[in-house]
Image (cartoon, grey):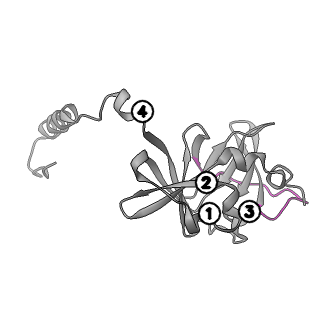
C-alpha cells in the first residue's frame, strides 16, 4: 500500500483504505481450511517456537492479576479471577524447563480446556496465527528433547524456522500437571 500524502483530506484517506480492503482477497474458507493445511496459535517458550491447534486454545489473554496459592507446585503461579471464575495459572516454561518465565507488560496467557475446568498457561511470547501445509512437515528433532518429548510429535518448517506442534491436550492429561499441589 502506498504511503498517504499528509495533505490528503481524511475522507480521501479513508476511501483509499476502503478500496485497498475491498481489493484484498483473503481466500475462500475452503482454501483456508483445505485438506493438507493446518493452522494454529504460535508462541515461544524459551528458545523453542511452538504452535498449538486452534481446537486446543480457547482464548488468548493478557496476564491478569494472580493470587498465589499456598502449597502449590512452584510452576503453579496461583489463581486469577477471569470474568467471575477462578482460573489456575501455570508457568508453562517453568513446568517444562525448570526456568521461570520473565514477566513483562505485554505478557500473554493461553486459556486451555482440561477435564474439570479451564487452565491458563503463561508463555514467553505470542506470535499469533500460523498456517502450514503438509509439505512443510519435518522431524521435530531437538524441539522434542527432554520433557518436550511428551508433547511434541511433529514440526513444520516455515521461513527457515522450525515450529514444534505442542499438544495442549496431552499437557492437560499429564498427572503431574493435573496435580499441582506440592
* In the image, residue 25 above or below residue 131: above
Q: Which mark is residue 95?
A: 3
Quarter assignment of residue 47: bottom right
Q: Can the viewer see residue 133 in this picture?
A: no
Q: Of callouts 1 and 4, which one flags the residue occurring earlier in the amino acid sequence?
A: 4
* Whether label 2 touches label 1, CB < 8 Å: yes
**Residue 2: image location, x then y, percent:** 12, 50
> Magenta region: which residues?
61-75
Residue matched to label 2 = 153
Q: Of callouts 1 and 3, which one flags the residue occurring earlier in the amino acid sequence?
A: 3
Quarter assignment of residue 145: bottom right
Residue matched to label 1 = 144
Determine whether the residue tagged by mark 1 lies in a helix, strand or loop.
helix
Residue matched to label 4 = 33
Question: What residue do we see at 11% from left, 41% from top?
Answer: 9
| Mark in the foreground, 2 or 3 | 2
* Distance Cα–Cα, label 1 vs label 3: 15 Å
* Whether label 2 touches label 4, CB < 8 Å: no
**Residue 8: image location, x then y, percent:** 9, 45
| Mark in the foreground, 2 or 4 | 2
Amino acid at each position: 500500500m502506498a504511503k498517504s500524502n499528509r495533505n490528503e483530506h481524511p475522507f480521501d484517506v479513508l476511501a483509499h483504505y476502503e478500496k485497498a480492503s475491498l481489493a484484498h482477497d483473503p481466500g475462500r474458507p475452503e482454501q483456508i481450511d483445505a485438506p493438507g493445511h493446518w493452522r494454529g496459535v504460535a508462541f515461544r517458550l524459551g528458545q523453542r517456537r511452538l504452535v498449538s491447534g486452534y481446537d486446543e486454545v480457547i482464548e488468548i489473554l493478557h496476564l491478569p492479576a494472580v493470587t498465589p496459592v499456598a502449597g502449590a507446585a512452584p510452576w503453579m503461579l496461583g489463581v486469577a479471577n477471569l470474568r467471575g471464575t477462578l482460573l489456575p495459572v501455570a508457568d508453562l516454561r517453568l513446568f517444562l524447563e525448570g526456568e521461570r518465565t520473565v514477566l513483562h507488560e505485554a505478557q500473554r496467557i493461553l486459556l486451555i480446556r482440561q477435564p474439570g475446568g479451564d487452565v491458563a498457561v503463561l508463555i514467553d511470547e505470542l506470535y499469533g496465527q500460523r498456517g502450514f501445509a503438509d509439505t512443510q512437515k519435518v522431524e521435530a528433532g531437538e524441539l522434542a528433547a527432554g520433557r518436550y518429548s511428551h508433547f511434541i510429535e511433529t514440526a513444520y518448517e516455515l521461513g527457515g524456522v522450525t515450529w514444534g506442534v505442542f499438544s495442549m491436550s496431552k499437557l492437560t492429561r499429564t498427572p503431574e500437571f493435573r496435580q499441582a499441589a506440592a
